[in-house]
Amino acid sequence: MTADPAPAETDAPAAPRSARGPRGPYAKSTERRAAIVDAAFEVFSTRGYRGGSLQEVADRVGVSQTGLLHYFPSKRALLRAVLERRDSMASGAPLDASPDRDFREGVLRQARYNETVPGLIALYAVLAGEAATEDAPVRDYVASRFEGLRAEYSDGFRDLEARGRLRPGVDPARAAAGLVALWDGIQLQWLLDPEGVDVEQQLRDHFESLVLPD
Protein backbone atom coordinates (compact mmCIF):
# COMPACT_ATOMS: atom_id res chain seq x y z
CA MET A 1 0.00 0.00 0.00
CA THR A 2 1.21 3.48 -0.73
CA ALA A 3 0.90 6.50 1.48
CA ASP A 4 -1.62 9.20 0.69
CA PRO A 5 -0.16 12.09 -1.33
CA ALA A 6 0.92 15.12 0.65
CA PRO A 7 -1.68 17.91 0.75
CA ALA A 8 -1.10 20.83 -1.58
CA GLU A 9 0.37 23.99 -0.07
CA THR A 10 -2.09 26.82 0.53
CA ASP A 11 -1.97 30.34 1.88
CA ALA A 12 -4.42 29.50 4.66
CA PRO A 13 -3.17 30.18 8.20
CA ALA A 14 -1.81 27.23 10.10
CA ALA A 15 -4.22 25.49 12.42
CA PRO A 16 -3.76 26.04 16.14
CA ARG A 17 -1.50 23.46 17.75
CA SER A 18 -4.43 22.03 19.73
CA ALA A 19 -6.32 21.30 16.49
CA ARG A 20 -3.48 19.38 14.89
CA GLY A 21 -2.79 15.69 15.20
CA PRO A 22 -0.04 14.24 17.40
CA ARG A 23 3.38 15.78 16.82
CA GLY A 24 6.93 14.97 17.75
CA PRO A 25 8.46 11.56 18.47
CA TYR A 26 5.12 9.90 19.28
CA ALA A 27 3.62 10.87 15.92
CA LYS A 28 6.70 9.68 14.06
CA SER A 29 6.67 6.40 15.97
CA THR A 30 3.00 5.82 15.13
CA GLU A 31 3.59 6.61 11.46
CA ARG A 32 6.62 4.33 11.28
CA ARG A 33 4.74 1.51 12.96
CA ALA A 34 1.88 1.85 10.47
CA ALA A 35 4.34 1.90 7.56
CA ILE A 36 5.93 -1.32 8.80
CA VAL A 37 2.54 -3.03 9.03
CA ASP A 38 1.66 -1.84 5.51
CA ALA A 39 4.94 -3.21 4.15
CA ALA A 40 4.51 -6.52 5.97
CA PHE A 41 0.97 -6.79 4.62
CA GLU A 42 2.34 -6.53 1.09
CA VAL A 43 5.22 -8.94 1.70
CA PHE A 44 3.09 -11.59 3.42
CA SER A 45 0.36 -11.35 0.78
CA THR A 46 2.85 -12.06 -2.01
CA ARG A 47 5.41 -14.33 -0.34
CA GLY A 48 3.51 -15.77 2.60
CA TYR A 49 4.58 -15.66 6.23
CA ARG A 50 7.30 -18.25 5.80
CA GLY A 51 8.62 -16.83 2.54
CA GLY A 52 8.50 -13.19 3.59
CA SER A 53 11.46 -11.95 5.61
CA LEU A 54 11.78 -9.21 8.16
CA GLN A 55 14.68 -7.86 6.13
CA GLU A 56 12.46 -7.39 3.08
CA VAL A 57 9.87 -5.60 5.21
CA ALA A 58 12.58 -3.39 6.70
CA ASP A 59 13.99 -2.60 3.26
CA ARG A 60 10.59 -1.49 2.00
CA VAL A 61 10.22 0.92 4.90
CA GLY A 62 13.81 2.13 4.77
CA VAL A 63 14.90 0.97 8.22
CA SER A 64 17.32 -1.63 9.48
CA GLN A 65 16.04 -4.97 10.72
CA THR A 66 17.16 -3.92 14.20
CA GLY A 67 15.11 -0.77 13.83
CA LEU A 68 12.08 -2.80 12.78
CA LEU A 69 12.44 -5.04 15.83
CA HIS A 70 12.23 -1.93 18.00
CA TYR A 71 8.57 -1.67 16.94
CA PHE A 72 7.79 -5.39 16.63
CA PRO A 73 10.02 -7.64 18.76
CA SER A 74 9.41 -10.73 16.60
CA LYS A 75 8.08 -11.83 13.25
CA ARG A 76 5.04 -13.34 14.99
CA ALA A 77 4.29 -10.01 16.66
CA LEU A 78 4.37 -8.36 13.26
CA LEU A 79 2.09 -11.06 11.86
CA ARG A 80 -0.45 -10.36 14.62
CA ALA A 81 -0.45 -6.69 13.67
CA VAL A 82 -0.93 -7.58 10.00
CA LEU A 83 -3.87 -9.86 10.82
CA GLU A 84 -5.43 -7.11 12.91
CA ARG A 85 -5.04 -4.76 9.94
CA ARG A 86 -6.57 -7.39 7.65
CA ASP A 87 -9.60 -7.82 9.92
CA SER A 88 -10.03 -4.06 10.19
CA MET A 89 -9.95 -3.72 6.41
CA ALA A 90 -12.38 -6.61 5.91
CA SER A 91 -14.87 -5.05 8.33
CA GLY A 92 -15.16 -1.95 6.15
CA ALA A 93 -17.98 -3.30 3.96
CA PRO A 94 -21.01 -0.98 4.12
CA LEU A 95 -23.82 -2.18 6.33
CA ASP A 96 -27.43 -2.67 5.31
CA ALA A 97 -29.71 -2.15 8.28
CA SER A 98 -32.87 -3.17 6.43
CA PRO A 99 -34.80 -5.72 8.53
CA ASP A 100 -36.03 -7.39 5.34
CA ARG A 101 -32.52 -8.47 4.34
CA ASP A 102 -31.12 -11.83 5.41
CA PHE A 103 -27.50 -12.83 5.80
CA ARG A 104 -27.15 -13.65 2.10
CA GLU A 105 -27.07 -9.97 1.21
CA GLY A 106 -24.30 -9.46 3.74
CA VAL A 107 -22.25 -12.26 2.16
CA LEU A 108 -22.68 -10.86 -1.35
CA ARG A 109 -21.89 -7.33 -0.19
CA GLN A 110 -18.73 -8.56 1.54
CA ALA A 111 -17.68 -10.47 -1.58
CA ARG A 112 -17.98 -7.33 -3.67
CA TYR A 113 -16.12 -5.27 -1.12
CA ASN A 114 -13.25 -7.74 -0.74
CA GLU A 115 -12.39 -7.36 -4.41
CA THR A 116 -11.98 -3.60 -4.03
CA VAL A 117 -9.33 -3.75 -1.29
CA PRO A 118 -5.84 -4.39 -2.70
CA GLY A 119 -4.18 -7.42 -1.14
CA LEU A 120 -7.07 -8.36 1.13
CA ILE A 121 -7.99 -11.61 -0.63
CA ALA A 122 -4.39 -12.45 -1.53
CA LEU A 123 -3.15 -12.15 2.05
CA TYR A 124 -5.87 -14.40 3.38
CA ALA A 125 -5.46 -16.98 0.60
CA VAL A 126 -1.70 -17.24 1.10
CA LEU A 127 -1.88 -17.48 4.88
CA ALA A 128 -4.80 -19.92 4.82
CA GLY A 129 -2.71 -22.22 2.64
CA GLU A 130 0.12 -22.11 5.16
CA ALA A 131 -2.28 -22.88 8.02
CA ALA A 132 -2.50 -26.53 6.92
CA THR A 133 0.83 -27.29 8.62
CA GLU A 134 0.79 -28.00 12.36
CA ASP A 135 3.38 -25.44 13.40
CA ALA A 136 2.05 -22.60 11.26
CA PRO A 137 1.73 -19.35 13.27
CA VAL A 138 -1.52 -18.58 11.45
CA ARG A 139 -3.11 -21.96 12.17
CA ASP A 140 -5.13 -20.82 15.19
CA TYR A 141 -6.21 -17.61 13.46
CA VAL A 142 -7.51 -19.42 10.38
CA ALA A 143 -9.15 -22.20 12.42
CA SER A 144 -10.89 -19.64 14.63
CA ARG A 145 -12.06 -17.70 11.59
CA PHE A 146 -13.51 -20.82 9.99
CA GLU A 147 -15.28 -21.73 13.22
CA GLY A 148 -16.76 -18.25 13.56
CA LEU A 149 -17.96 -18.16 9.96
CA ARG A 150 -19.57 -21.59 10.19
CA ALA A 151 -21.41 -20.53 13.33
CA GLU A 152 -22.54 -17.23 11.78
CA TYR A 153 -23.75 -18.82 8.56
CA SER A 154 -25.41 -21.70 10.39
CA ASP A 155 -27.48 -19.14 12.26
CA GLY A 156 -28.32 -17.46 8.97
CA PHE A 157 -29.47 -20.68 7.36
CA ARG A 158 -31.46 -21.61 10.49
CA ASP A 159 -33.25 -18.29 10.25
CA LEU A 160 -34.16 -19.07 6.65
CA GLU A 161 -35.27 -22.55 7.72
CA ALA A 162 -37.52 -21.07 10.41
CA ARG A 163 -39.15 -18.90 7.76
CA GLY A 164 -39.72 -21.88 5.49
CA ARG A 165 -37.19 -20.67 2.94
CA LEU A 166 -34.68 -23.54 2.85
CA ARG A 167 -35.13 -26.21 0.22
CA PRO A 168 -36.13 -29.66 1.56
CA GLY A 169 -33.21 -31.68 2.87
CA VAL A 170 -30.84 -28.74 3.38
CA ASP A 171 -29.06 -28.93 6.74
CA PRO A 172 -28.07 -25.48 8.07
CA ALA A 173 -24.74 -26.59 9.55
CA ARG A 174 -23.64 -28.45 6.42
CA ALA A 175 -24.83 -25.59 4.23
CA ALA A 176 -22.71 -23.20 6.29
CA ALA A 177 -19.58 -25.33 5.96
CA GLY A 178 -20.20 -25.64 2.23
CA LEU A 179 -20.58 -21.88 1.85
CA VAL A 180 -17.26 -21.24 3.60
CA ALA A 181 -15.51 -23.80 1.39
CA LEU A 182 -17.07 -22.45 -1.80
CA TRP A 183 -16.29 -18.83 -1.01
CA ASP A 184 -12.65 -19.52 -0.20
CA GLY A 185 -12.21 -21.65 -3.30
CA ILE A 186 -13.89 -19.17 -5.63
CA GLN A 187 -11.80 -16.31 -4.24
CA LEU A 188 -8.64 -18.29 -4.96
CA GLN A 189 -9.79 -18.86 -8.53
CA TRP A 190 -10.56 -15.14 -8.80
CA LEU A 191 -6.99 -14.31 -7.76
CA LEU A 192 -5.71 -16.44 -10.64
CA ASP A 193 -8.28 -15.23 -13.18
CA PRO A 194 -10.06 -12.05 -12.03
CA GLU A 195 -11.60 -11.45 -15.46
CA GLY A 196 -12.95 -14.96 -15.86
CA VAL A 197 -14.32 -15.67 -12.38
CA ASP A 198 -17.34 -13.87 -10.92
CA VAL A 199 -17.29 -14.50 -7.18
CA GLU A 200 -20.57 -12.77 -6.45
CA GLN A 201 -22.47 -14.64 -9.16
CA GLN A 202 -21.07 -17.99 -8.03
CA LEU A 203 -22.29 -17.26 -4.51
CA ARG A 204 -25.70 -16.19 -5.82
CA ASP A 205 -26.00 -19.44 -7.76
CA HIS A 206 -25.05 -21.40 -4.65
CA PHE A 207 -27.68 -19.66 -2.55
CA GLU A 208 -30.31 -20.36 -5.22
CA SER A 209 -29.54 -24.06 -4.97
CA LEU A 210 -30.21 -23.98 -1.22
CA VAL A 211 -32.93 -21.37 -0.74
CA LEU A 212 -36.42 -21.22 -2.18
CA PRO A 213 -37.20 -18.13 -4.29
CA ASP A 214 -39.09 -15.23 -2.71
Image (cartoon, rainbow, N blue to C red):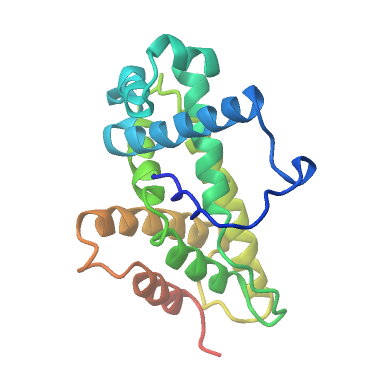
Q: Position of residue 149 (x, y in %)?
A: 55, 51
Front residue of 189/16: it is 16
Front residue of 136/36: it is 36
Q: Is residue 25 left or right of residue 5?
A: right
Q: Residue furthest right?
A: 18
Front residue of 40/70: it is 70
Q: Position of residue 17 (x, y in %)?
A: 75, 40
Residue 28 shows in the view: yes
Q: Is residue 188 left or right of residue 31?
A: left
Q: Residue furthest bottom?
A: 214
Q: Quick check: 187 above or below 51?
A: below
Q: Position of residue 210 (x, y in %)?
A: 47, 74
Specify the quadrant of the image occupied by residue 21: top right
Residue in view at x 45 percent, y 74 percent? 207
Q: Quick check: 75 above or below 167?
A: above
For the N terminus, which image quadrant? Answer: top left
Q: Position of residue 43 (x, y in %)?
A: 33, 33
Residue in view at x 24 percent, y 63 percent? 194
Q: Residue furthest front?
A: 11
Q: Is residue 153 left or right of residue 68?
A: right
Q: Quick check: 178 above or below 85?
A: below
Front residue of 37/146: it is 37
Residue in view at x 51 percent, y 88 percent? 213
Residue 74 shows in the view: no
Residue in view at x 51 percent, y 28 percent? 32
